[in-house]
Amino acid sequence: KQEVTQIPAALSVPEGENLVLNCSFTDSAIYNLQWFRQDPGKGLTSLLLIQSSQREQTSGRLNASLDKSSGRSTLYIAASQPGDSATYLCAASHSNDYKLSFGAGTTVTVRA
Amino acid sequence: EAQVTQNPRYLITVTGKKLTVTCSQNMNHEYMSWYRQDPGLGLRQIYYSMNVEVTDKGDVPEGYKVSRKEKRNFPLILESPSPNQTSLYFCASRHLKDSGANVLTFGAGSRLTVL
């Protein structure tokens, strides 16, 4: 069974600092890996999706990398802003059977 | 606006009183799914549906039922709720085609408390 872990559970950084969020998974035979953002009282919003054949994806200040051999994905957020404060979750997809295994998330606070 | 709508958003009920959480999407998505989110455990899949009249169990289906009579609706039914079903519930949907590129659209969540 796929286990997805996100460490740390929470972190706080000053505005302008680059954020590095980690995600590890136990089964390297993934179909894709997704990063989501969750704001209080709202649902999850997809940020980036990396196919198993890709090494990274970028969107604006966000960059996500994938290393299947080591079972790791990293989400980088450049020049953090207070509006980046949220919980970030990663999820690994098992082949194409539409089942996602989620990590518990990392709650980020960006201090102004 | 393309969206997934869940109702109710908040509910407090008592043990054993049947309840239904509705989920509706307006994007003509074939795939729909229910998750529950508990502190420290992340989201866990309860049930999912690939199309009308096609449903399957996720990782934690015990105590829940679903139905998919129409493409847009995927209600979650708790026949006899228990306190361990107190949780935050999310419904999500997406197209089946090009599943590797399509991402899930989530509802805003339904916070359920069972006393």
Image (cartoon, coloured by chain):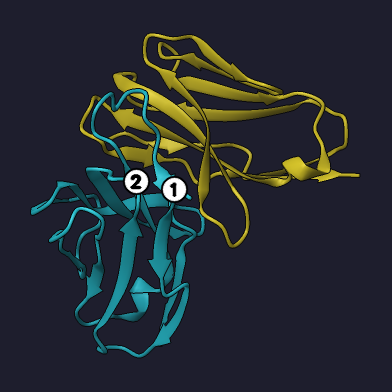
Q: Amino acid at mark 1?
A: Ala
Seen at 25% across and 66% down, the residue is B75
Q: Is residue B68 above or below residue B114?
A: above
Residue B27 image label: 2
Residue closest to the far left: B53
Q: Amino acid at mark 2?
A: Met
Q: Nearer the viewer, residue B27 or A25?
A: B27
Residue A52 image label: none
- Looking at the picture, how far across and down is residue A97, in whole percent? 20, 32
Q: Are marks 2 and 1 on the same chain?
A: yes
Residue linked to disc 1: B2
Q: Quadrant of the N terminus of chain A?
A: top left
- Looking at the picture, how far across and down is residue A68, in whole percent? 41, 14
Chain seen in cyan? B
Give the chain letter at badge 1: B
Chain-order first, disc 2 or disc 1: 1
Seen at 21% across and 82% down, the residue is B80
Q: Is residue A60 above or below residue B84?
A: above
Seen at 44% across and 9% down, the residue is A54
Dividing the picture into quadrants, the one containing residue A25 is: top left
Mark 1 crowdedness (10 Å alpha carbons): few <14, some 14-19, many ≥20 = few
Q: Is residue A97 left or right of residue A67?
A: left
Is disc 1 placed on a helix, strand or loop? loop
Q: Is residue A40 above or below residue A101?
A: below
The hue in which chain A appears in the rendered picture of the protein? yellow
Count of picture labels: 2
Dividing the picture into quadrants, the one containing residue B62 is: bottom left
